[in-house]
Amino acid sequence: MRVLVFQHVDCEHPGSLRQFLAEDGIDWDPVYLHRGDKIPHFDDYDALWVMGGPMDVWDIEENPWLIDEKAAIRHWVKDLGKPYLGLCLGHQLLADALGGTCGPQKIPEIGVLEIELTEEGKKDPLFKGTAEKQQCLQWHSVRVAQAPEGAIILANSDVCSIQAMRIGKNAWSMQYHVEIESDTVDNWGAIPEYAEALRNTLGQGALSELKQKTDQNMSQCLSCAKQIYDNFMGQIV
């Protein structure tokens, strides 16, 4: 088994999920799209993971590679029907690539905040064994405004109605971050766009408070990440 990972900034990698891949002896190959890496042929890969990033789905002038990335996601999910997992920007890209829409999040979600599984989410194989309400790291100012046709909404929050979704039987995505580990907040806080959004939403000095909250919640995050990882891998045939 081999996993292909699309990255949009160096420090937004699979995070804690890397540990689980290593424990299972599964190889994974990152494609650093922001560095100009080319998307490889898909024949040798069993799953595609698309990570977060500071750009938005419509920033094609500054990041023209987004056009090819969306086409690749569409081909992977719709034509090949292979397993897909998208996180944050990867959630938005899935929606955009398959005919949904994304737009500004009126109230940015930044912090350790609660998401809740929908009735469909409680039955979905990806969330089997996870809590109906979860405290998760959020760091986004854009949301999926309209899911693609046929998408199943799996989780929501008070201010964001599409926190997680499934398309078909092979593609899942989440607006929030399940992959965090001990250095995630520090690394992301060094990204200018993320730091600005954090200050604008939570004020000066918010980084240390966010770091403290994620540390307090880390055990639950890692447990949930492992369960979701196992559930996702169980869908690969």
Image: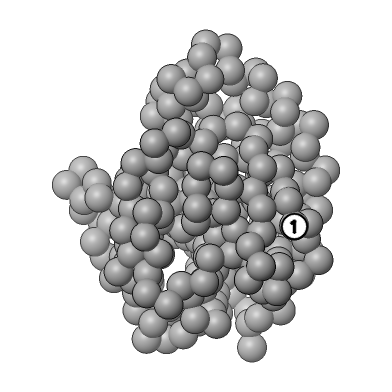
Residue at 81% x, 53% y is 223
Where residue 52 appears, x then y in whole percent? 47, 49
Q: How is the image coloured?
A: one colour
Residue under numbered circle 1: 132
- Amino acid type shown at disc 1: Glu
- Which quadrant of the rendered structure holds the C terminus? bottom right
Q: Is residue 210 above or below residue 62?
A: above
Q: Is residue 24 above or below residue 64?
A: below
Residue at 66% x, 59% y is 117
Image label count: 1
Kindly state the secondary structure of the residue where label 1 is placed: loop
- Residue 135: name its quadrant: top right
Residue 182 showing in the rendered view: yes
- Residue 196: name its quadrant: top left
Q: Residue furthest left?
A: 61
- Residue 93: name its quadrant: bottom left
Q: How many C-alpha atoms fall within 10 Å of the one at disc 1: few (<14), some, or many (≥20)?
A: some
Name the residue nearer the viewer: 218 or 100. 100
Residue 37 showing in the rendered view: no
2 sits left or right of 98 in the view: right
Name the residue nearer the viewer: 233 or 116. 116
Where residue 166 appears, x then y in whole percent? 53, 71
118 sits left or right of 82 in the view: right
Residue at 65% x, 18% y is 208
Q: Is residue 66 above or below residue 81?
A: above
- Which quadrant of the rendered structure holds the N terminus? bottom right
Residue at 39% x, 82% y is 78
Where residue 132 appears, x then y in whole percent? 75, 57
Where residue 3 appears, x then y in whole percent? 56, 70
